[in-house]
Amino acid sequence: MRRRLLLLTAATTALVLTALLVPLTLLTRSHAADRATAEATARAQWVAHAIGPALASAGERPTAEQTVAGVNGDGLPRTSLVLGDGTVVGPGHRSGGGAVTDAVRLARTGRAFTYEPAGGGRQVLVPVHGAADGTAVVRVTLTERQLYAGTLTSWLVLAGIGVGLVLLGLLLADRLGARLVGATRGLARTADRLAAGDLTARAVPDGPPELRLVAGELNRLAGRIDELLRAERENARENAADLAHRLRTPVAALRLDAESLRDAREARRIAGDVAALERSVDDVIRRARLPLRGAACADLAAVARERAAFWAPLAEDQGRGLLVDVPVRGGDEASGPPLAPVPAPVPVPPDELSAALDALIGNVLDHTPHGTAFRITVEVTGDGHARVTVTDEGPGFPDGDGEAAARGASGGGSTGLGLDIARRTAEDAGGGFVIASGPTRVTLSFPLAGTPSGPPAPSG
């Protein structure tokens, strides 16, 4: 847009200046010729007036020759006198009949005039009346250079003015284009932030009135979207509260019925199912009460270190080795003192990310034999993703490939909801969930914050 505006301004200014300067150049040329002709006419009239008395007496002819010689000089128009007998007084002219041209004969009739000879330039002829041997004619000759003297300088001045006006127009157009482009890009950045979920983004009204109007309407739209989402969230919270109120009583009744069963095995089985139902209801309510995600993000590496430190005492009590491997600048923690970790920001709220990691770590602590070591690895891949992998040497998942666990079921005496929560956390953020065996590996992948979500990186 900015380049097009500059090209349009340059073309428009050039057309206007062409329409203005071409007539001005012709006018300056005509003015220079008229001025030179006027000066030559004044010179010829002065010479005619000065030598008129001398030509009236035949004895004063040398005085006329001195007068003609006195008005000639370097760079001046050539001035000559054609006497009545055809004799020419002055430099560079023929004598005799060849000097008496049709123009001279016309001037001898008493007419003073200017004409342009075939060889170029211009001549001014003024008759001198009262000469003893007939009418004499004063002839002043202008060359092309003398006729248009000063024209080139005037043209250069006009060209300089034209170039200056074009540059000034381009400067003003560039400033205007920069303002327009800057305001437009600001609107685009605000729209991108809103599209990415940052509902606090607002445009700064700038630029011409039309763009300020667009900025105001964009801000109104962002505010309206925020209001609608908040209203939707409040409605969801109310529905969740109503659901909790409606389900608490029948769930409590089911628990009491289960406890009253005579068959202890059936009682434990039904109590486990009721507990799973309670956890499912609690999970629905918890997710409904979560604040709007918006542009919330967390550092995957920092959360992994924090959750590992939280579970380290329990792992130590169970005789487990725990190793945390996060990317660091310049090396890794195994080769020397801890270095500054490389941030791995992902578009997940910190509490959700912590819950997902707790589910993976809790799965190892609850379903592998005591003494089984495990490792938490955080990696940043080259395709704009970050992933966290929990690896252990335990017996693996009962179904072999872990697909059942990924669906929220488990054959190890649990509900499988922890892994399902972890899976949904990754997939809701645009990432992926992968389970592998030999050794057992559970991997969550997330797109890096500020990076468009795409296919998650393979777990390797």
Image (cartoon, rainbow, N blue to C red):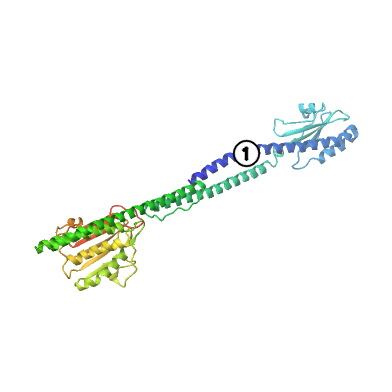
Q: Nearer the viewer, residue 99 or 135?
A: 135
Q: Quadrant of residue 134?
A: top right
Query: What is the number of callouts on the image?
Result: 1
Q: Kindly tell me whether residue 412 is visible in this rendering.
A: no
Name the residue located 76 percent from the left edge and 41 percent from the top edge.
Answer: 76
Q: Nearer the viewer, residue 232 or 139?
A: 232
Please tell me whether residue 239 is drawn above or below residue 160 in the rendered image.
below
Q: Nearer the viewer, residue 280 or 339?
A: 280
Name the residue located 24 percent from the left edge and 62 percent from the top edge.
Answer: 389
Name the residue located 54 percent from the left edge and 43 percent from the top edge.
Answer: 9
Residue sticking out furthest to the left:
263
Q: Nearer the viewer, residue 314 or 82?
A: 314
Q: Quadrant of residue 32?
A: top right
Which amino acid, by three-letter code, is at mark 1? Leu
Position of residue 306 measured from the top left corner of the image (x, y, whole percent): 30, 68
The residue identified by callout 1 is 20
Disc 1 residue crowd, few under 14, some 14–19, many 20+, Cα 10 Å: few
In the picture, which quadrant includes the C terminus?
Answer: bottom left
Position of residue 137 measured from the top left corner of the image (x, y, whole percent): 81, 31
Please tell me whether residue 243 is drawn above or below residue 394 in the rendered image.
above
Position of residue 167 measured from the top left corner of the image (x, y, whole percent): 57, 47
Please tell me whether residue 214 is drawn above or below residue 282 in the rendered image.
above
Asked if residue 391 lies left or right of residue 143, the reply is left
Q: Quadrant of residue 331?
A: bottom left
Q: Secondary structure at mark 1?
A: helix
Q: Kindly tell me whether residue 151 is visible in this rendering.
A: yes
Position of residue 376 measured from the top left corner of the image (x, y, whole percent): 25, 65
Asked if residue 186 lies left or right of residue 435, the reply is right
